[in-house]
Amino acid sequence: MTEENVASPITGERERRLAKVQAIRAAGGEPYPVRFDRTHSAAEISAIYAPLESGSETDDQVRVAGRIMLLRRQGKLTFATLRDGSGEVQLFVSQAEMGNDEFAAFDDLDLGDWVGVGGRVMKTRKGEVSIKANAVSLLAKALLPLPEKWHGLSDVETRFRQRYVDLIANEEARRIFAVRFSVLSTLRKIFSERGFVEVETPVLHAQAGGATARPFMTHHQALDMPLTLRIALELHLKRLLVGGMERVFEIGRVFRNEGLSTRHNPEFTMLEAYQALADYTDMMTLVEELVVECAQAANGTKMVTIDGTTIDLSPPWPRRTMIDLIKEATGHDVHPETPLEKLIAIADELEVARNPQASAGQLILDIYEKTVEPNLVSPTFVLDYPREVSPLARAHRDDPALVERFEAVVMGRELANAFSELNDPIDQQERFVAQEALAAAGDAEAHGVDHDYVRALEHGLPPCGGVGVGIDRLVMLLAQVSSIREVILFPHLRPERN
RNA sequence: GCGCCUCUAGCUCAAUCGGUUAGAGCAAGUGACUCUUAAUCACUAGGUUCAGGGUUCGAGUCCCUGGGGGCGCACCA
């Protein structure tokens, strides 16, 4: 971007600040000096000196650093609000304390500038812990002005395009990403405590698998071959169980070449975990514990409120089969072995949009998604999916037309998806072949046959349970926001154009 | 991809039925002010009303095309 482009919207203010930069340099100063040593964070100062009596001063010399957020100048005394990564602390900058030259230099600072401050801790008569500054140095000059101090930055487009400004201006943005970090670190802690090993598997795949989704395509120049970005973590992680790693998890970015919405970003973060010798019932307990512990860590409560609806995340969550839920919602008995014509009639009666070539299993899933899922508000495990729509899950122990799979649904949204994993290589090969037929028929989201994965299974995948959690959706739930863009630092937007 | 809504100063918002010179607060500049808390007071400056066409005596306002964004639908997690 050229200088003119940056300058054009707010030439006056930027020019004025640039002139200060030049003046500082002309006077032998440095507007962007290297490093600064501080003794305390703003939050530490506030906490340590909270008991101090109002109107009293200490001889405790401290050094802090941060961005100037507010200035309240009143002649020979200026109050400033300094913010660092921990919080805010007030600066008490008096001409008598600083001396005329230093005070004038302070007066030259602008909102948004980063400064290092040395001074003694005091508490004002009104009771605010402050630093009575005796040395202030510019650490980084800001050329662009801050958004409005009271309303902050509310333009949604600017908030996402210029997330740095959003983070400066809006406490809510800072809160949401604190929740996100809390969730991620809690998840890692829980898995670590349970003996799971965190691993990293390839993002570039020769063949996308592990989910039904359209992948992004890319190309490797040196090898002159097409590659896809991964759409799931699943197949590599299960290969690791074949290798004898009994408990593994990965938290990683996956990519799906689909539409954008309040719930979809083309790149998003998945957690997947696999546990040898477990089945999907173990995964249900695990999901309950993960979600509750993350909620406690992030919010200190198991309750969550989004758009006026309050939900209790306390386990145990009801465990209901998809077939029972459909019966309850519609009065219809459905099963993968129900004649296709009958399922079509039911779907049409319920005004369920359907693909003309849909299988019985697909129709049942469509009926469930239309009539049941949106109404599942409090956390619910939906169990036992049709086999055709779950090519990586093992056949149900009691009904081979179904698989041992569940989704955890909260507020009508899928939060987690889990199986008793399919570990029979012959069955897996047949499922892949069935998927390949769908792909050949034009389904851009169907799996192909992953021969190496089948070969891995032929070495013996122990019985295992696996679970996938959409981290962004979990963070949405716990941060209590209704758009995925709020929980992704730099959500995907169309390129901006002038 | 489709439908609806939206875009005015750096930021947050006004502008009656299409009417004359597009206003205000914050931020900025100048001045006053040594206990402020969104400090206060006075004055000043700040605009390609997203872009391009059109209708009209006259367009921020109406129409068309394009762009960005939001919401919903579709796809999906």
Image: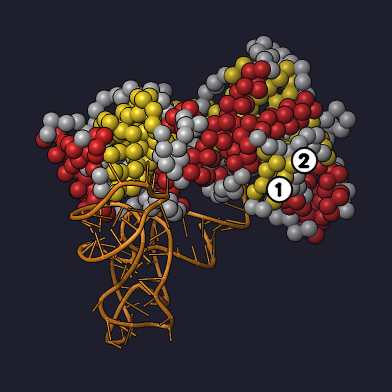
Q: Amino acid at mark 2?
A: Thr
Q: Amino acid at mark 1?
A: Thr
x then y, percent, for residue A241: 67, 16
- Residue drawn 24% across the image and 34% down it: A98
- Measuring 65% from the left and 21% from the top, which residue is drawn there? A191
- For the residue pair A226 and A369, the one nearer the viewer reads as A369
Q: Quadrant of the N terminus of chain A?
A: top left
Q: Is A34 situated left or right of A171 in this image? A: left
Q: Say whether residue A315 is visible.
A: yes
Marking on residue A395:
none
Q: Chain of mark 2?
A: A
Pointer 1 chain: A
Q: Residues within 10 Å of mark 2 (few under 14, many from 20)?
A: many
Q: Is residue A469 above or below residue B71?
A: above
Q: Name the element at disc 1.
A: strand
How many numbered tags mark residues here? 2
- The residue that mark 1 highlights is A310
Residue found at x 66% / y 22%: A190
Viewer-nearest residue: A60 or A329: A60
Of the numbered discs in the image, which one, if any, rests on residue A380? 2
Q: Residue furthest left?
A: A26
Sequence order check, earlier mark of 2 and 1: 1
